[in-house]
Image (tube, rainbow, N blue to C red):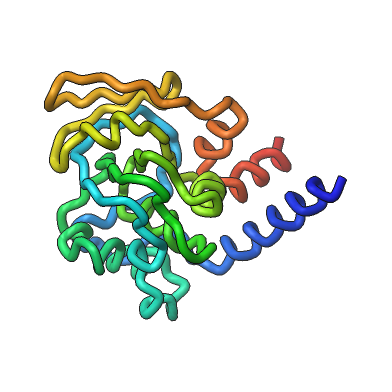
Amino acid sequence: MQQAIYDSKRRNVSISIFHRFRIGVTGSGPGIADHQENAMQNIQGKTFKYPDNVDTDVIIPARYLNTPDAGELARHCMEDIDKEFVNNVRKGDVIVAGWNFGCGSSREHAPLVIKTCGTGCVIAKSFARIFYRNAINIGLPILECEQAADEINASDTVEVDFDTGIIRDITTGKTYQAQPFPEFIQNIINSGGLLASLGKGKRG
């Protein structure tokens, strides 16, 4: 019972935080995609590879958190670890990382800016627990696969089938199996996140 109350409160907090961001992406700078296209389709893209323990302050430095505009925030995504990321990332590209990706603060800005940049998926050995939940809340596809995270190289071309959890490195020809999300979580991501899925439920 207490857990149910906790989850309910956290869901309301997540929705409240989500409302603070203007979701429309302003401008048309390089690497910034319109992330209002929410379908969780299979993706193919180039990989960007990062080490263990990439924290939320690396994903989006706190010094930029004085704007509610997701598009403006996304222009600084990964800036402190990879200054050229936002200039090079294209819609459908994939971030590959080590253990504990998204550790640090609980801010939802981190998965939001990754999604706003057009990133199609994050593959990691593991995710920080709160980042994992926030990614689902805002509709960012993520997959855990230790072998894939170990063996996929930066700039490889990777294809991801979200229904099966199959990751295929087209560059090397290797295939990896991640655990796909259950249907109810896929539905949240397909809807563009928790807030959008709840809105669809009300309209239904």
Q: Nearer the viewer, residue 199 or 174?
A: 174
Asked where in the image residue 149 lies, by quadrant, the reply is: top left
Q: Is residue 8 above or below residue 168?
A: below
Asked where in the image residue 93 lies, by quadrant, the reply is: top left
Q: Is residue 69 above or below residue 146?
A: below
Question: Could you tell me which residue is drawn at 42 percent across and 50 percent down?
Answer: 100
Quadrant of the image for the C terminus? Answer: top right
**Number of numbered discs:** 0
Q: Nearer the viewer, residue 66 or 58?
A: 58
Q: Nearer the viewer, residue 1 or 163?
A: 1
Question: Could you tell me which residue is drawn at 36 percent across and 24 percent down?
Answer: 161
Question: Could you tell me which residue is drawn at 16 percent across and 19 percent down?
Answer: 173
Q: Where residue 165 appears, x then y in whole percent?
A: 41, 23
> Is 59 displayed left or right of 10 in the figure?
left
> Is 178 displayed left or right of 136 in the figure?
left
Q: Is residue 23 above or below residue 178?
A: below
Q: Nearer the viewer, residue 74 or 103?
A: 103
Quadrant of the image for the N terminus? Answer: top right
Q: Where residue 187 appears, x then y in whole percent?
A: 57, 32
Question: Could you tell me which residue is drawn at 41 percent across and 35 percent down?
Answer: 143
> Which residue of the protein is positioned furthest toward the right in this rendering?
1
Q: Where residue 64 appears, x then y in whole percent?
A: 37, 77
> Is 181 displayed left or right of 78 in the figure?
right
Q: Where residue 154 appears, x then y in whole percent?
A: 16, 42
